[in-house]
Amino acid sequence: MKKILVLTDFSENSVHAAAFAQVLAKQLHTGLLLYHVVQSIPFVPNYAGGGFVTETENLFAEDSRTQLVELRDKLLAGREDAASMDILTAEGDLGSNVKQLLQDSPIELIVMGAPESSVADHLLTGSETRTVIRSSERPVLVIPMCMPVKAISNFVLATDYRSEDLSVLRYLSKWAMKVDGRLDVVHVQTNGEVAALNGQQRQIFEFFLNNLEFDNYQCHDLHGKNIQERLHRFCADKKADVLAMINYHHDFFSRLLGSSHTFKALHHLQLPILVFPANFTDVAAPSEQPR
């Protein structure tokens, strides 16, 4: 069975994200894997000459397992219809561990929490989030603390209309079809950027969506000044449950979120943000039923 990988450090925001992932697991017919990485501890000689570091690592690993069991029990309490839920702890570098885990396990989606500040702020400054995105071939969903726990059905995809985006369109359309949801595809032209696309390229995307037999979608263009503010309003008008974007090795991602004078407009966009890595592959699609 495919699984949603839930990264947790047992903070309030990561526990909230785990509860969110539990709802998504039922929606997508997947299991859950609660995962915590214990950071490596460098060897420090001690005067007693014993195995202090090794013993300390063992204590941290045991504490990690204990907290994972407590989190699993909390999520499963009183829920007879809960998705299957496994726990796993690892030691070392977060990025390397996530990359290896994705090679060994059928991970559908990665879910992690963001602190109370803006999710966009967290994506730009959170080193762990950046590490996970760089290490992953699966989409990464970042959940803000303020977001009520609920299923996702209405998607907004911010895109440059590149050919690489077609796999993301397929993935999101299957998810939207599965939950009777809606997909709004937004061509984002940042301020001062020369338009590099024309109507024909947009028609390619619409033709691609039509061939997927998905009809609850619409393509839009957003351009001009204050594009981030317009995207914020667009998501609110469409009652979007999530804002999705593709991280083309940080260029589009950073242009959309990163400049200091335009970033403020997205600072209060408290939506979950679904980031697709540049090397994303849609082999594991949400519409596939568990075996």
Image (spheres, rainbow, N blue to C red):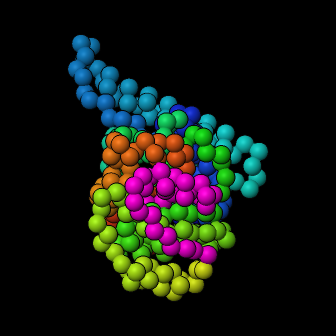
Which of the pair 177/138 is nearer the observer? 177
Position in image of residue 230 (x %, y %): 49, 55
244 falls in the magenta region = yes
The residue under the point 35% across, 42% down is 261
Identified at 56% across, 63% down, the residue is 155
Which quadrant of the structure image shows residue 15? top right
Is residue 106 visible in the rendered image? The answer is no
Percent x, y of residue 278: 33, 63
The image shows residue 148 at horizontal and vertical percentages of: 65, 46
Q: Is residue 54 left or right of residue 5?
A: left
Give the position of the N terminus as an image quadrant.
Answer: bottom right
Return the residue found at the far top. Answer: 47
| Residue shown at 34% from the left, 47% from the top | 258
- The relative height of residue 220 versus residue 144 in the rendered view (above or below) is below
Q: Is 233 covered by the magenta stretch?
A: yes
Left or right: where 90 falls relative to 178: left
Foreground residue among 117 and 265? 265
Quadrant in the picture for residue 67 = top right
**Residue at horizontal 36 percent and vertical 35 percent from the top:** 39
Q: Is residue 192 visible?
A: yes
What is the residue that sits farthest to the front in this orientation? Answer: 225
Which corner quadrant holds the C terminus? bottom right
Measuring from the top left, give residue 33's x and y in whole percent. Answer: 53, 52
Magenta stretch bounds: 216-245
Note whether 30 is above or below 43 in the view shown: below
- Of residue 159 and residue 27, the one placed in the foreground of this image is 159
Q: How many marks?
A: 0
